[in-house]
Image (cartoon, rainbow, N blue to C red):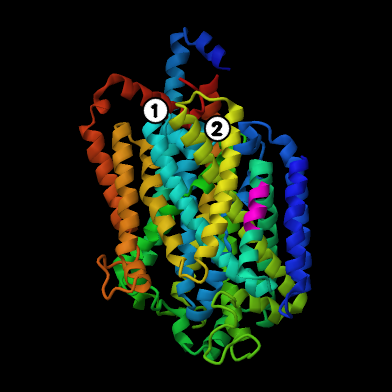
Amino acid sequence: MLIFSIGFSKNKMSETDSQNNFNKLVKYQNLISVSFSALVLLLYFSFIIIVGFKPELFAPMVFNETIPIGIVFGISIIIFSIFLTILYVIISNFFLDNLRKKIEQ
Amino acid sequence: MNLFLSFTSLLLVPFDTFAFSESKTTNNYAILTFLIFVITTLIITYFASKKTKNKDSFYAAGGKITGLQNGLAIAGDYMSAASFLGISGLVFFSGFDGLIYSIGFLVGWPIILFLLAEKLKNLGRYTFADATSIRLDQFYIRILSSVGTLLTILLYLIAQMVGAGGLIQTLFGLSYESAVIIIGSLMIIYVSFGGMIATTWVQVIKAILLLFGATILAFMVLKVNDYSISKLFNEATTIHRKGQDILFPGQLIDEPLSAISLGMALIFGTAGLPHILMRFFTVPDARSAKISAAYATGFIGYFYILTFIIGFGAIVLLTNNSNYITTDGGLIGSNNMAAIHLSHAVGGDIFLGFISAVAFATILAVVSGLTLAGASAIGHDLYAYVICRGKTSEKKEIFISKISTIVLGIIAIFLGIIFEGQNVAFMVGMAFAIAASANFPILFLSLYWKNLTSKGAFYGGFIGLLTAAILVILGPIVWVDILGNANPIFPYKYPALFSITAAFISIFLFSKIDKESLSNKHRKLFEKQFYKSYTNIEK
């Protein structure tokens, strides 16, 4: 594959194409990596900061006054994290792989 | 191969005599289940040893592990007995506070997937130092990474060994020393003969057993409570002596800054654990590396939700039952026994035996992964690249790695026995702090920051490492609780906030004053690495 790409790189057009695709790949890949990471960190640290600074925010009870909102929030962070990893793999492995294939050629 | 068999028989003889000569606390179902696990894994190790002929197979299982298998193996590597028994025990005593740890241990995983997994796989081959040193001075970076790895591994190993010795003493009626020796010997056999292939399968089998056991346990708890979480919480708050308080944040975090610092240690420490990072090299490509991280997040997250249910179930089913509870409200055995006693309460001797054997298998899988990562750091990073400067034969390197496995195993047994009965919980905290303050910053910056230089990484990394270690020693846990001084010199239990900051600032400053950052060659190398990290193509 590599030998081919060197062979073809004499063609000016395909080289800039490949560079454009690479820039696109970096852009989208970083967009999901950074925004998803920021989302997880934001949720987690707001949980931690509430526990540390304002635990009374976790006092209200939900679901017919049986389950405290703090536990619901905590468990939701775990479930949401799992959901985000699945979404990330779908975007990166299915949509962005098309770009990677174009770059390889 | 004769060597393999004689090692194995050496191990099984003392095991038999120990196991069946002991007192009435011995549970035969536990021994049976555990023996089946050991025999199965030894058979796997035997076949793995035939395939373990070169570096690729020894360190990375030939890159032939699938995404699902690796996801299970990562979960098996990461879900330690400490998190299974420790967190369910914490929930049993304090309720909500257990959740703080569970979430912290989990959220490192999405971060690893989003920022590290793909690039690590594209750049590295066997150890994470392969990736960090790709454009930097091999000599400096490998020294730093292997010191960071070995310290993390040893601290983690001692904590596992001491915990395991005590646990197995209670569950199997073995003496503490023989428990530690059995674990150490089995781990030496798995790793030195079967390398990454055997280690992976030990972890996969353990993960399946643990997930299965925890699922049954949580299911039984829900069944007793009519499948209603509301009822479970209601019963628990009625019976627990802290009452309603168990549903809210308690005493675990009394100090906000500590909370943030602990959170950083858990997240970035996880992302800097060498035995975990190494697992990403066992799959064929970046695609499967990402899939395995997503599977791992799913399994680990599911597991932590189960431990929370198990902890609350233990409150409902064990409290006031004198078979499990001491007169002053503690758990018989140790404070980690909540899940174990619960298994007996819901499933009798057979299920208790199964869960006990799973706990034993859990420890084995974790220590094997740790030992393999330590041996790789010695053989691959220190011997091949630092001592031989990259000029050594594959055979010699593997030989050194295998010898290191045996030496690390013996050291772990020795230290495990020395530290019997000591408070070693701080060692896991220190391992996470060091991983978060030395391994993680170097890995992260080498992937993303073009101005990082070899000297910047080297000095900055060591400053992070030393800051983490020293602040743990000067903090309340070691300086006051263990060394018996009146007041801590450093006021916080968890130093990660300060040591990670120290690492990033000093890496930045040392890189800035390093002339290497100005050279054209430096910039070109980063561009090449950057391209490869996204595409796996050499530019």
**Magenta extent:** B183-190
* Residue B189 falls within the magenta-colored stretch: yes
The answer to which of B415 and A62 lies nearer the viewer is B415
The image's mark for residue B49 is none
Query: Which element is circle 1 on?
Result: loop
Give above or below for B342 relative to B412. below
Task: Confirm whether residue B211 shows in the render.
Answer: no
**How many callouts does the rendering have?**
2
Please give the chain letter of the residue carrying mark 1: B
Q: Where is residue A44 in the image (x, y as percent from the top left)?
A: 41, 61
Query: Which element is circle 2 on?
Result: helix
For disc 1, the marked residue is: B135
Instruction: Please state which amino acid type lies under the numbered disc 1.
Output: Arg
Give residue B57's quadrant in the image.
top right
Q: In this view, does B349 lie to the left or right of B457?
A: right
* Residue B362 falls within the magenta-colored stretch: no
The answer to which of B162 and B463 lies nearer the viewer is B162
Q: In this view, does B281 lie to the left or right of B513?
A: right
Secondary structure that dominates the magenta span: helix
The image's mark for residue A97 is 2
